Image (spheres, rainbow, N blue to C red):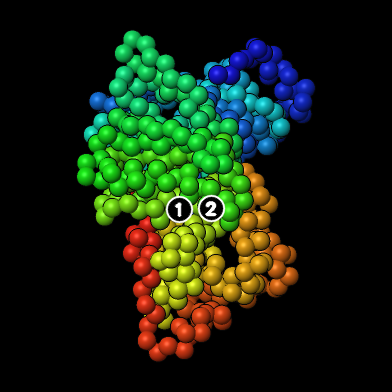
Amino acid sequence: MHRRIIAPGALAAASVLLAIPASAASASPGAPGIGDPYYPAYGNGGYDVSHYDLRLKYQPATDELEGTATILARTTQELSRFDLDFLLDVSEVRVNGAVAAFTTSGEHELEITPKTPLAKGAAVTVVVRYRGVPSSEKAYGFTSWHRTADGGVGANEPEAAWWWFPSNDHPLDKATYDVSVLVPDGTQAISNGTLQSTSSRLGWTRYNWRSSKPQATYLATLAVGKFDIATGTTESGIPVVNAWSKDLGDNAGAARASVERTGEIADWLSGYFGPYPFDALGGYVPNTNTGYALETQTRPFYSPRQFANGSNVSVVVHELAHQWYGDFVSVAGWKDIWLNEGFARYAQWLWSEHEGEGTAQELADYTYASHPADDAFWTVRPGDPGAENQFDIAVYDRGALAVQALRNEIGDEAFFAVLKGWPKQHAYGNASIADFREYAERISGKELGSLFDTWLFQPAKPAAPAARTAAIAKASAAPAQPKSWRSIAATNDVHRH
Ligand SMILES: [Zn+2]
């Protein structure tokens, strides 16, 4: 889809005019990690990607994936060499049109050495040709590519891209995407964003998907299989594409009944979080046996297991809340995961309140009372849980308690102003918990250091939120279980392996 009107040589020459030429003496290798202390090898240093163009062919019968990734980037230092994160077998790499040397290292590094060093601030086009069987590839002993009866699905957090495209795999480097996938006729390819077109020829069908807003690598998804696809438009005018595997068995009705609420839920959430930030919307339910859901951008991934007990709108609320808290504004580092999970969980509490199945305060009271002071639950610090506890239930539940504590501290007016104002503060970018605290302090006019420390950073059960409902605070009996409790507790995007 990229019309190249400049020859590779001319592009390289143009780059030189814009940037100080690199010399072999001053250029150095880009770091093999972007600098995230939780995952030192994730992402890479020395460049910033603006666009991924992925042209893929997938054979469901054998799980064979072949592709060409064209990556548009800009260097942030003089580079003698740089890495991409990837697992499949690479046959050729070109940098600005010239064949480049490459090798693999570590668990998932593809090291690329361009023919000549790259200048700082230069535009770079990297073409990677590759093939492989994603389900057979493991890093750190696991795979994020889920084989299904009729295809495969790439969805996980924080690792998902390595199995289907080479990338700078960290939320700090967001980019736009064109994902074009060739699959056998009768099979569908689902990805993020807008389905621009499909075309069939010689027994194969091509699906062209476009994500026109910046997207973190872990939020990119690909699913191939036999799907029913339904299209529509939200009341606010956003086009919706939902997809369900034809192979969901008894869960099919409940899955459809839940995901078909997507437009309604997104419109409802926009009342709290501001206008929906993307130009496409939907959800998909492949026939995986994974147990989690994931907020893949514009089109969350749901597991059929989440609909085993009937419809589950709560999980749809959770994943759609992430479209603002996680996708529109992404973590600056993985330790900031509370900004995603604390707020997605809190959105489920707000939905419960909306449905008359328990107020957010009642859910907070019940959650708080459910964990005695000596429960290991309180040892997980949602503000810095560590990689091993990044998706621990405490990040969700204690995380939402922290949101309720903030609400009680600053009052509803300031609280809902923060909830709605925050996403656009860092639109399509990244932010940290420290940034959020600063923003909440500015809007509320209150110093919140002690509140944040108590609820997010201390490995101990805090004193009960000051403004808990009087009835609960006075009652000696434990708070009653809100009606929504079970469906909320069943919602987890626990992504570990
Ligand atoms: Zn989540």
* Residue ID at (41%, 81%): 373
Which residue is outermost to the top?
A: 202
Residues packed near mark 2 inside 10 Å, few (<14), some (14 to 19) or many (20 plus)? many
From the viewer's perspective, is residue 395 above or below residue 58?
below
Q: Quadrant of the N terminus?
A: top right
- Quick check: marks 1 and 2 in contact, CB under 8 Å? yes
Q: Amino acid at mark 1?
A: Val
As drawn, is 309 to the left or to the right of 418? left
56 relative to 409 in the view: left or right:
left
Q: Which mark is residue 255?
A: none
Residue 415 position in % (x across, y down) = 63, 66
| Horizontal and vertical percent position of residue 436 | 64, 60
Residue 450's spot in the image, x, y percent?
A: 63, 76
Q: Nearer the viewer, residue 171 or 312?
A: 312
Q: Amino acid at mark 2?
A: Leu
* Residue at x 38%, y 64% (from the top left corner): 484
Horizontal and vertical percent position of residue 211:
54, 32
Badge 2 element? helix
Relative to 57, residue 294 above or below: below
Query: Tag count in the figure?
Result: 2
Q: Earlier in the sequence, mark 1 or mark 2?
A: 2
Mark 2, residue position: 269
Q: Residue at x 67, y 66 (%)?
A: 414
Q: CA distance from mark 1 to mark 2?
A: 8 Å
Q: Quadrant of residue 107?
A: top left
Residue 95 visible in the shown view: yes
